[in-house]
């Protein structure tokens, strides 16, 4: 008998306070210097665009976008390690770019470690390019690390 392969159900929705524990757990598994639970809570309280990607009802990724004066900053974008390379990071990025466009944002910025080659590949694929370098911006295991500042201008069609 051929058994049907169960379809994975993926939903992207706004983050709520009930998601914070799952989000913080993924954050701790993903970064050497993770944001605390309190930082995520403050992002929600500040009214930032906070979204989660749910896979079969379970939080599998999240992103945070701050918007002000026609500009937006992607403050975080992260997928649970065991679910990477399934296209979910790109889906989340598409959603926050859609939200930015809906908020009349003209340009989106973000900082990324130059050593984070997977994130850089994703951002370049989505049309971001480097506009600046912030020396010694990040804490690193052996001191400090620069940040590459990337930007993307938004138009109505991309
Ligand atoms: C960066 C991150 C969000 C990508 O999420 P993901 O779900 O694994 O990425 P996707 O499967 O959607 O891949 C989309 C694109 O990203 C790039 N990419 C992602 N993973 C890659 C890998 N292992 N090797 C090479 N390129 C990769 C590719 O360009 C890919 O497009 P392609 O499949 O057409 O080649 C994920 O690796 C992550 O959570 N990293 C830890 C947190 C982090 O560093 N966030 C960024 C902070 S600025």
Image: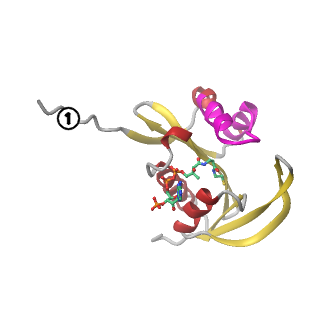
Q: Position of residue 29 (x, y in %)?
A: 64, 35
Q: Can residue 104 be seen by looking at this rendering?
A: no
Q: Residue at position x 73%, y 39% from top?
A: 34
Q: Residue at position x 48%, y 70% from top?
A: 156
Q: Nearer the viewer, residue 48 or 86?
A: 86
Q: Residue at position x 75%, y 34% from top?
A: 36
Asked whether, in this view, residue 88 is left or right of residue 134, the answer is left
Asked whether, in this view, residue 65 is left or right of residue 42, the answer is left
Q: Position of residue 84 (x, y in %)?
A: 51, 46
Quadrant of the displayed image that contains ligand 1: bottom right
Write down the quadrant of residue 6 in the picture.
Answer: top left
Q: What's drawn in magenta, residue-wise?
A: 22-44
Q: Position of residue 91 (x, y in %)?
A: 46, 52
Q: Quadrant of the N terminus?
A: top left
Q: Position of residue 148 (x, y in %)?
A: 74, 65
Q: Principal SS element in the magenta part?
A: helix
Q: Is residue 35 magenta?
A: yes
Q: Is mark 1 within 8 Å of ligand 1?
A: no
Q: Nearer the viewer, residue 70 or 142?
A: 142
Write down the quadrant of residue 15 in the picture.
Answer: top right
Q: Is residue 5 above or below residue 158?
A: above
Residue labelled with disc 1: 4
């Amino acid at each position: 008998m051929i058994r049907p392969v169960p379809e994975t159900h993926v939903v992207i929705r706004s983050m709520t306070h009930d998601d914070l524990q799952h989000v913080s757990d993924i954050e701790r598994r993903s970064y050497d210097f993770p944001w605390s639970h309190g930082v995520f809570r403050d992002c929600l309280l500040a009214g930032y665009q906070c979204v989660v990607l749910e896979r079969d009802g379970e939080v599998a990724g999240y992103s945070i976008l701050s918007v002000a004066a026609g500009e937006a900053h992607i403050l975080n974008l992260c997928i649970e390690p065991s679910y990477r390379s399934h296209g979910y990071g790109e889906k989340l990025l598409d959603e926050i770019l859609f939200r930015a466009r809906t908020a009349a944002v003209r340009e989106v910025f973000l900082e990324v470690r130059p050593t984070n080659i997977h994130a850089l590949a994703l951002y370049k694929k989505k049309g971001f390019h480097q506009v600046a370098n912030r020396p010694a911006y990040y804490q690193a295991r052996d001191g400090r690390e620069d940040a590459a500042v990337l930007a993307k201008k938004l138009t109505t069609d991309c």
